[in-house]
Image (cartoon, rainbow, N blue to C red):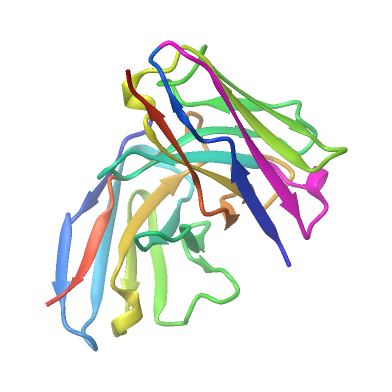
Amino acid sequence: EIVLTQSPGTLSLSPGERATLSCRASQSISSLGWYQHKPGQAPRLLIYNTSFRTNGTPERFSGSGSGTDFSLTISRVEPEDFAVYYCHQCKSPPYTFGQGTTLEIK
Amino acid sequence: EVQVLESGGDLVHPGGSLRLSCAASGFTFSNYAMTWVRQAPGKGLEWVSSISGGGGKEHYADSVKGRFTISRDNSNNTLFLQMNSLRADDTAVYFCAKDRSVLTGYHYDYWGQGTLVTVSS
C-alpha cells in the first residue's frame, strides 16, 4: 500500500497570502490528485494527473511534482479556500488518501 | 445535471450487515467507474472500493476486503455496497463518487452528500 504523508497538518494564513501544501508518497507514483473538503459538503476534485485543473477550479490553484514529492499551490488564498485538502493516488490499488492539510484563517 | 444520491445508512449492531445504494442520474452510468469513500467521525477521507463501468474490475481497501462487496446495476443506474461483519471502526459517512473514466483510477469528479453508517451495540 502506498502511504501518502501530507504537510503541514495545519496551515494558518491570511487572505491574499500564498499557500503551499505538500504530499509525499512512500514510493514513486505516476500522478496524483487533490481534493478540497468543507464540513457538511461533498469533497471536490480540484486537480487530477498532478497538474490538470478540473473545469471550475480557479486558476489560482496549481499542482506540481513527480516521483514521490507533490504539491498544491494557491497563489493568493481567497476566503472560500479555507478548508481541508487531501491528496489521493488511484494508480496503484489499494488507492489511498493523505491524512489531510487544514487551511485555516490566521 | 450529474447527480449521485446515497441511501441506506443506518444504525447497526457489530457483526451485522447493511447495503448502501447510490442512485445516479445525468450521465451514461455504464460509461463510468464508480467509487465509495468514507469519513469516520473526526477523521480524514478513506478510499473504500471502486468498480469499473462494466463491473468487471473491483478494488478494495485492505480494511474492508473480504467483508464488503461493491456492485452495480447498469440497467437501473445504481451502485451498491454490501457491508457484512460490520465493526465499530466502520462507523462513518459513506460517499458515492463518479469516476472520470470507464476504468478505475482516474479520480472522482462528482460526489454525493453521503450517508451515515453507525455500528454500535
Is B49 left or right of B21, judged from the image as shown? left
Total of numbered circles in the picture?
A: 0
Q: Residue at x 40, y 17 (%)?
A: B13
Q: In the image, which residues are magenta?
A: B15-33
Q: Nearer the viewer, residue B20 or A62?
A: B20
Q: Please check the rendered image and state whether residue B25 is part of the magenta-colored stretch, yes or no.
A: yes
For the residue pair B5 and B27, the one nearer the viewer reads as B5
Compared across the picture, whether A1 is left or right of A12 comes to right
> Where is residue B120 shown, x and y percent of the image?
33, 22
Q: Locate the N terminus of chain A and report the quarter of the image it occupies.
A: top left
Write the residue at 51% across / 30% down: A93
Q: At 48% from the left edge and 62% from the top edge, which residue is drawn?
A: A44
Residue at the image position 57 percent from the left and 52 percent from the top: B108
Say above or below: B97 vs B78: below
Residue A92 to residue A31: above or below: above
As displayed, is residue B36 above or below residue A23? Answer: above
- In the foreground, A5 or B36: B36
Q: Residue B32: image x %, image y %?
A: 74, 46
**Outermost bottom residue:** A16
Q: Can residue A75 be seen in this view?
A: no
* Residue A92 sits above or below residue B33 on the image: above
Is residue B111 visible to the viewer in this orientation of the structure?
Answer: yes
- Residue A78 lies in the magenta stretch: no
Q: Position of residue A2 (x, y in %)?
A: 37, 33
In what quadrant of the picture does the C terminus of chain A appear? bottom left
